[in-house]
Amino acid sequence: MLLRPSDFRIRFHCWFSFPVLPKDMSRILFCILTLVSFSLSSLADERPNIILIMSDDMGYSDIGCYGGEIETPNLDAMAKDGLRFTQFYNTGRCCPTRASLLTGLYAHQAGIGHMMGDYGLPAYKGDLNRSCVTIAEALKPAGYRTYMSGKWHVTPYRGDKAGNPDTSNWPLQRGFDRFFGTIHGAGSFFDPNGLTRDNQHITPENDPDYQPEGTWYYTDAISDNAVKYIKDHAKQNSGEPFFQYVAYTAAHWPMHALPEDIAKYEGKFDGGYSPARQARINRLKAMKLLPDQWEVVPQVGNWDDVKLKEWEAACMEVYAAMVDNMDQGIGRIMQALKDTGEYDNTLVMYFQDNGGCAETFGRGKLVGPLERPEKPTLPPMGKDELQTEMIPPQSRDGYPLRRGDGVMPGPPETEIGYGRNWANVSNTPFREYKHWVHEGGIATPLVAHWPKGISSQGEDFRETGEGPLYDSPAHLIDLMATAIDLAKTEYPKEFNGKPITAVEGISLSPAFGGKALDRGKPIFFEHEGNRAVRDGKWKLVAKGVKSDWELYDMEQDRTEMNNLVDQKPEIAAKMAEQYETWAKARGIVPFGSWKKEQKKVKHVSAKPGDTFSGNSSPSVAKSVFTVSAQVSELPADGVIASQGGSNMGWALYVLDGKIHFCTRSGKSLTSASAELPKGANQDFEATVQRKKIVLKANGKKIATVDGSPLIGSHPQDPFMVGIDEGGLVGNYPQKNDFGGRVKSVEVVVK
């Protein structure tokens, strides 16, 4: 068993407790101390530093060494001198990937079976549980220092509680010595919400530890703080190894980039989707990443049908600039390792949290001005004013939010994604996108670099001009086991007095020596009802809770174009049984089934400051219900009460001198509006009937609208008073705090 430094300290303390030591004993003790000190120093020197670098919402073929046209010379150099895994997997989505990466478990076992919502089941709490440990918590007792820079996103972020946040599940409370980054999962690259140093929320302007000479840009900030931690470690803890987790938000929406990075790609994508995609296919084949027998997935999107070609090309230009900037930062991290003498004995692994993102974020209807105003039109934010909005209503210097078709991406006040068609290019040559567990959603590059630890040759390596390839399937769950193995420590059976779930993955150490992995069991996937099993060359996969299983031979058809489920029913049946056994043992249930099991909430009374979960919110799905609110200090704009978001929900709000009540069910929005009655105090009542909405003020009917206002399913975002913090139900601004006073709100489901 490996003895930790703390073991020796305890024993030495006991020896020194004697008031007098004989002369010979003193000499013996001195020798023992010298030998122990030498032994521990040697151990620290032999064990590698470990750096895990993860990017956000990027496709399999985006970076240069996996076929992309985006300039990533630093990642390419790492690949050439290291190792590229061809079949490494994530979970298909942000939060679950981070949970698996950190813990070595499937995300459900860590309490994050979906996202950050609490669905009342242990596997779906939306908060990293205490039945797991993070890599930082596992390595710290073995003498590792631990640092993190970037996106956390394994515990809920509450913008309304930013002044007094619950830090109990933040990085410093989960094993990290130092942290710079964001608690939330997405936001502006120039003013991210939830920006944090250690346990304190900060702003780009008031952070005493990081004030760059040029423009503050989050990707640069993540890179530069990672570099600082490496250099500080060399000065303060040079005798100890370190573990560092670098979690970029590039290239997650919004498409934000620095002008000098965007300029490098001007005109690069003017030809549209097809030329970019075909060039990737050609490079993938030349790099031996795309065998001839794999049929490439059909192209999505026809460039001839695109009306705003300049805008559409610009979206991909900015996306490329975001990736380019990240690679520059990775180069600075690698240089810091060289400068501190840690380059040769540091294992650096780069990978991505899910595939390219097909979400339509920021596209469609125009919000704000199409062109940027000549001057800021809003008051600038104060130096200490925290950004709490994922979609800020303005930039810090006062430019108003702009989004929608035709708004050129890049500047701080824009909020736009690059869309489904470019995501199809990013995921070349695979099917589907982020969210799904076909290869386009879960296949990621893995570039491993470790001069002292990765063999130059191996029997399971395939040599290419861009560096060796390694084909054994592997998964994020393997990163914990790898770290434990390389740190020469043991995975804990309990931690802080609580039993810990056994690690699921296996060490990747054999891969570094060019040997095949001996997993001995399948790899499993589940997200939003999308599910899969990977066992050897076979993959069983289904899209959605109710979809049939598909079966593919990954050696002959990794692009999943030739479903063999009818030709190989016995293999499909065996793998389906494996999935059901795995899912049941880990508390996985059919996605959304908790909505049927939860107790109906038919009456809720609330006031500002009351908080609700999804389960404790009114059960309005497919039901007639009434919302009553007592309001004062009118006129004032903002949301009086809300439940749900941009897919399902309802909201009562005041905007532009009118009182509005709306319901949303999928793409259907039903809204009743009336002029705001005179008087500071008002009692509003909105009733949702099966075919109409009736809106009253002080007992008098003021508006009626016919339609289909019933809400199709239980809203995910919880009931809120005085604000709508999640996805927006109605057509009101992202910053929508009610400016008056809400005395009380009552919801009755009939």
Image (cartoon, rainbow, N blue to C red):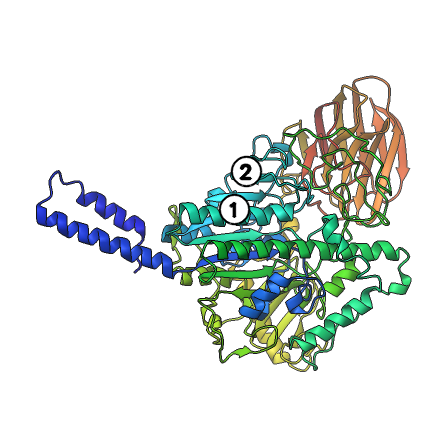
Residue 347 horizontal side relative to residue 704, left or right: left
Residue 209 is labelled as: 2
Q: Amino acid at mark 2?
A: Asp
Looking at the rendered structure, the secondary structure element under dot 1 is: helix
Image x and y of residue 319, in percent: 73, 55
Residue 318 horizontal side relative to residue 171, left or right: right
Image x and y of residue 488, in percent: 37, 61
Image x and y of residue 322, in percent: 69, 53
Residues at circles 1 and 2 in contact by the CB criterion of under 8 Å: yes
Residue 721 location, quadrant? top right
Q: Is residue 691 above or below residue 132?
A: above
Residue 725 location, quadrant? top right
What residue is drawn where x is 86% and y is 29%? 656
Q: Which residue is mark 1?
A: 228
Let me know if residue 448 appears in the view: yes
The Cα–Cα distance between marks 1 and 2, rounded to whole angstroms, is: 10 Å
Q: Residues within 10 Å of mark 1 (few under 14, many from 20)?
A: some
Q: Residues within 10 Å of mark 2 (few under 14, many from 20)?
A: few
Instruction: Looking at the picture, tell me which residue is in the foreground, 347 or 480.
Output: 347
Residue 102 horizontal side relative to residue 383, left or right: left
Instruction: Looking at the picture, tell me which residue is in the foreground, 690 or 573.
Output: 573
What residue is drawn where x is 83% and y is 30%? 655
What residue is drawn where x is 18% and y is 50%? 30
Image x and y of residue 599, in percent: 63, 43
